[in-house]
Image: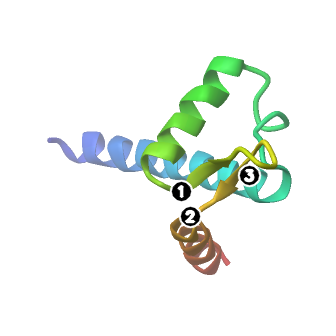
Amino acid sequence: MSPSDAIRENRDRQATLELLFAALEHIEARGNLLLLSTDHGHRVRIMNAMTELELVEWNSAIRKYEMTLYGRQCLAEYRGNAA
């Protein structure tokens, strides 16, 4: 892999992480991603990724997604590093 490819891959990974953490903040505040993206398919892909990574889970009693303990820990660590 060339240095420019490595830089591009790192930048793409960082952008993906930024999106996931922005999505976690929306889940924490609202329980959904409606204000994050108007594209339903995009929201579904984000939620599927976060569910697969066990960052969020569906709470059927209140009909909202909630962050898991692991999701909260990841967001707290991200906020600590981003500050």
Q: Viewer-proximal residue, 61 or 68?
A: 61
Task: Determine crowd level at label 1: few under 14, some 14-19, many 20+ residues with C-alpha closer than 10 A.
Answer: many
Which residue shows up at 77% across the image and 51% down it? 26
Name which of mark 3 and mark 1 comes first in the sequence: 3
Q: Which residue is label 1 attached to?
A: 55
* Quadrant where the image shows the C terminus: bottom right
Q: In this figure, which colouring scheme has been used for the structure?
A: rainbow
Note whether 20 is above or below 49 in the view shown.
below
Q: Which residue is label 2 attached to?
A: 71
Name which of mark 2 and mark 1 comes first in the sequence: 1
Which residue shows up at 85% across the image and 50% down it? 30
Q: Which residue is label 3 attached to?
A: 27
Residue type, label 1: Leu
Residues under numbered marks 2 and 3 in contact, where contact means CB atoms less than 8 Å apart: yes
Residues under numbered marks 2 and 1 in contact, where contact means CB atoms less than 8 Å apart: yes
> How far is mark 3 from mark 1, CA to CA?
10 Å
Quadrant of the image occupied by residue 76: bottom right
Residue 4: image x %, image y %?
29, 42
* Quadrant where the image shows the N terminus: top left
> How far is mark 2 from mark 3, CA to CA?
10 Å
Whether residue 53 sits left or right of residue 19 in the image: it is left
Which residue shows up at 85% across the image and 37% down it? 35
Q: Secondary structure at mark 2?
A: helix
Which residue shows up at 76% across the image and 38% down it? 33
